[in-house]
């Protein structure tokens, strides 16, 4: 993830931190000595017992406030902390009970000094510490102020009633336990920041559940430490924004991507990511919904929608829906803006029903975000109408424009791909759409065209081999053996439709989904082109039958082959449109109508395309190549028929025509075409029948029946089996 802290101006601590060291406690560090090195000055041993105890209590009170003392030693330990020691040269010879009791008091003093150093280091939020450590430092500083007030009261009592060292030890025991707990908290977050620091504090506080004397303090600390993370969560789930200058939030943003330049699915999947290291344990069960809620609102923001009023409106509707429910108090709105927030107190976070509270709030935020986005998609983007527009053109729901386009662009599409003008094709396509019933489509201007590098069979073969394609169908990563060689193809084989998908439509129709649409579309266009060419073949045959009635029987075999080819192509187109695309489209529209989130729409749409590709045989490389080979035989036969019939029309004498047919080996050539067609079709039908049994697919079984309606191939197989004695 791209770092955001580099763009944030670092906030430096105030100058008096270094100019007035006695206010921060750093003066002790400056004059700290090696342990046992203290010498000179007053000694306790020669003093009377009463004076020893009074002087010791005064030194202990000074140490409890982090102030330099007369008889105690302060030193820097191996970990860099300034600590006090009661066993010093100046306390040698003192009464035997003084040093042990004084050592008990100094445990509190040492804990206080360690906690105070943490507070001084985290008074201001910096890139190294962040807001969470600052919040902990401020919370602990408030507790230390109460502690200092307590020590001042002890000092006052000592000056008025002369406290004994034993009494001092008794009075500081509760503070010692609290300070030890604060020291544990400080040590727990020593090498952590952001959500990770909050997680450490929360786990430590949760481990003390049941210790009533510490609950108030722990709830106070947890509430303060959690506040920055919960405010960031608020900004994410209520506004779709990441307000995280120090990279402490558990959702990270790749700031290098923008929705305008990013490529759909990559943007949706890659712009935001969950940062597990910053995820507190109590939010982990809800991270999926939190993450998606923020992404939904971010999509709305990128669409130019003012998120706040939309969220407020839907949230009020949701609260009204739960009137009388036991969860309504948890959904209480903030008095300032009327919106439910994620700002839980420390006692609420440490309560036994924390999971339930957070779950109610997260579910509310998720429902609000998803409904807001779905409302925008349905009413403003009109997602169903957009998908219907794509279906109209790519899946040939209304194909009258295609007839006009093929007629107008036939000359251009017949050229080699490298010689085809894509601009001219786009103009002819636009003209064809505008002069057809498809002109009523409100989004027909988004339709355009592309020329691919390969024909559809080669492209599918490369995809199944692992080669990736971009939107234009250009190859990337051509290291795949045997599939990187280009071959000359015509404009017909390279042509496909394309569609301009703008934000947020491109989240649903990504590059991958558009490629799937193009594969189905190219397959249908190829079949339609073959059907069109066989239609021209029928026209030529009709002319022959009309002009050469005496020789009609010479063309019977050719007529029959053309009819079988035409029946095959039409059955394949009908199967794809009626048995595959139409039922799957109905399932898609029904699923979208019930969908509650954008992710559900994306999943349903991907399922629709994957199922359509699989059932239409486009994604099956083996069957598609066989089918493509059959259509190539049909195209060659149609071209041959046009050439032969043109030569026949130039003759007038039937005998000359017979000689012309013999010279060009007409009957033998037709027989070769018939053999190739029948062999390839039989191979395809065998494969389809095997697949139909394996998948238990009634559609494929029906397709096999349609391809052999007259049982021609079944009877031929029986005859061939009988001939070989099978």
Image: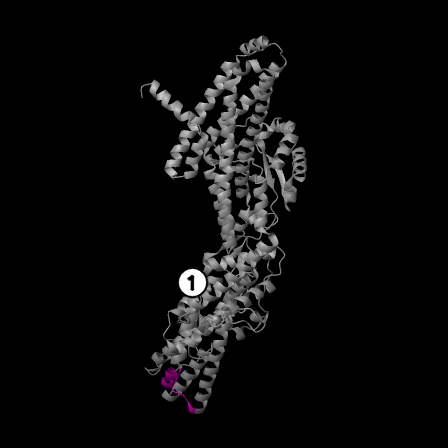
Q: Residues within 10 Å of mark 1 (few under 14, many from 20)?
A: some
Query: Where does the image place residue 547, in percent across and percent down from the top left?
Result: 61, 16
- Look at the image and tell me whether residue 344 can be seen: no
The quadrant of the picture occupied by the C terminus is top left
* Prevalent SS, magenta region: helix
Question: Viewed as shown, does residue 203 lie left or right of 506?
Answer: left
Q: Which residue extends farthest front?
A: 550
Q: Quadrant of residue 52?
A: bottom left
Relative to 189, is 616 above or below? above
Q: Residue at x 61, y 48 (%)?
A: 502
Query: Where does the image place residue 235, in percent across and percent down from the top left?
Result: 55, 63
Q: Quadrant of residue 217?
A: bottom left
* Residue 383, magenta (yes or no): no
The part of the chain drawn in magenta is: 161-171
Question: Viewed as shown, does residue 65 lie left or right of 398?
Answer: left
Q: Quadrant of residue 655?
A: top right
Of residues 87 and 139, the one nearer the viewer is 139
* Residue 164, magenta (yes or no): yes
- Look at the image and tell me whether residue 501 can be seen: yes
Query: Where does the image place residue 83, in percent across and percent down from the top left?
Result: 42, 72
Give the residue number, with chain letter if any, for mark 1: 281
Relative to 585, is 252 above or below? below
Q: Residue at x 39, y 36 (%)?
A: 692
Q: Circle 1 sits in a helix, a strand or a loop, which is it?
A: helix
């Amino acid at each position: 993830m791209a770092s955001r802290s580099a763009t944030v101006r670092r906030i430096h601590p105030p100058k008096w931190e270094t100019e007035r060291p006695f206010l921060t406690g750093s003066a002790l560090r400056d004059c700290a000595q090696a342990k046992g090195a203290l010498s000179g000055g007053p000694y306790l041993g020669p003093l009377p017992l009463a004076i020893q105890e009074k002087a010791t209590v005064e030194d202990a009170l000074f140490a409890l406030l982090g102030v330099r003392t007369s008889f105690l030693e302060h030193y820097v330990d191996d970990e860099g902390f300034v600590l006090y020691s009661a066993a010093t040269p100046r306390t040698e010879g003192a009464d035997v009970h003084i040093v042990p009791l004084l050592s008990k008091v100094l445990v509190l003093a040492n804990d206080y000094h360690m906690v105070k150093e943490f507070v001084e280091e985290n008074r201001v939020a910096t890139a190294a510490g962040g807001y969470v450590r600052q919040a902990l430092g401020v919370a602990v500083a408030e507790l230390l102020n109460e502690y200092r007030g307590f020590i001042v009261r002890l000092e006052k009592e000592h000056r008025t009633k002369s406290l004994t060292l034993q009494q001092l030890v008794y009075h500081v025991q509760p503070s010692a336990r609290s300070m030890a707990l604060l020291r544990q908290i400080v040590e727990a977050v020593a090498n952590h920041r952001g959500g990770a620091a909050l997680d450490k504090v929360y786990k430590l506080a949760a481990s003390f559940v049941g210790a009533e004397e510490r609950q108030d303090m722990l709830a106070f600390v947890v509430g303060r430490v959690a506040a920055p993370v919960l405010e960031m969560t608020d900004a994410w789930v209520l506004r779709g924004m990441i307000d995280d200058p120090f990279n402490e939030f558990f959702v990270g943003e790749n700031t290098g991507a923008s929705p305008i330049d990013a490529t759909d699915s990559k943007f949706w999947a890659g712009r935001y990511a969950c940062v597990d290291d910053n995820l507190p344990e109590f939010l982990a069960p809800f991270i999926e919904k939190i993450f998606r809620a923020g992404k939904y609102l971010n999509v709305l923001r990128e669409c130019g929608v003012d998120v706040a009023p939309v969220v407020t409106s839907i949230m009020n509707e949701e609260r009204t829906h739960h009137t009388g429910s036991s969860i309504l108090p948890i959904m209480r709105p903030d008095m300032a803006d009327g919106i439910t927030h994620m700002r839980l107190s420390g006692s609420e976070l440490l309560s036994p029903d924390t999971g339930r509270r957070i779950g109610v709030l997260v579910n509310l935020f998720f429902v609000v975000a998803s409904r807001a986005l779905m409302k925008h998609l349905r009413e403003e983007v009109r997602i169903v109408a957009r998908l219907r527009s794509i279906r109209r053109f790519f899946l040939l729901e209304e194909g009258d424009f295609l007839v006009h386009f093929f007629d107008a662009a036939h000359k251009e599409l017949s050229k080699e791909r490298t010689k085809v003008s894509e601009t001219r094709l786009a103009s002819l396509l636009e003209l064809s759409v505008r002069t057809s019933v498809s002109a009523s489509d409100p989004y027909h201007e988004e339709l355009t065209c592309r020329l691919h590098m390969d024909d559809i069979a080669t492209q599918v073969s490369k995809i199944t081999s692992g080669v990736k394609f971009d939107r234009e169908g250009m190859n990337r990563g051509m290291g795949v053996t045997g599939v990187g060689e280009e071959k000359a193809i015509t404009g017909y084989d390279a042509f496909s439709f394309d569609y301009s998908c703008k934000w947020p439509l491109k989240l649903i129709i990504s590059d991958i989904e558009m490629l799937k649409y193009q594969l189905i579309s190219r397959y249908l266009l190829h079949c339609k082109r073959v059907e069109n060419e066989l239609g021209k073949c029928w026209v030529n045959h009709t002319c022959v039958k009309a002009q050469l009635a005496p020789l009609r029987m010479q063309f019977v075999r050719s007529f029959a082959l053309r009819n079988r080819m035409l029946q095959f192509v039409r059955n394949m187109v009908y199967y794809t449109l009626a048995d595959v695309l139409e039922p799957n489209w109905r399932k898609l529209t029904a699923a979208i109508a019930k969908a509650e989130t954008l992710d559900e729409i994306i999943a349903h749409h991907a399922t629709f395309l994957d199922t359509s590709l699989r059932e239409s045989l486009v994604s099956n490389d083996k069957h598609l190549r066989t089918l493509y080979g059959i259509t190539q035989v049909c195209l060659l036969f149609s071209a041959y028929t046009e050439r032969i019939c043109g030569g026949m029309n130039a003759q007038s004498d039937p005998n000359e025509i017979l000689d012309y047919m013999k010279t060009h080996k007409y009957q033998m050539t037709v027989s070769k075409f018939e053999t190739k067609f029948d062999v390839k079709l039989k191979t395809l039908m065998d494969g389809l029948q095997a697949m139909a049994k394996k998948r238990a697919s009634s559609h494929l079984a029906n397709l096999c029946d349609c391809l052999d309606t007259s049982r021609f191939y079944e009877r031929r197989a029986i005859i061939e089996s009988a001939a070989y004695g099978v």
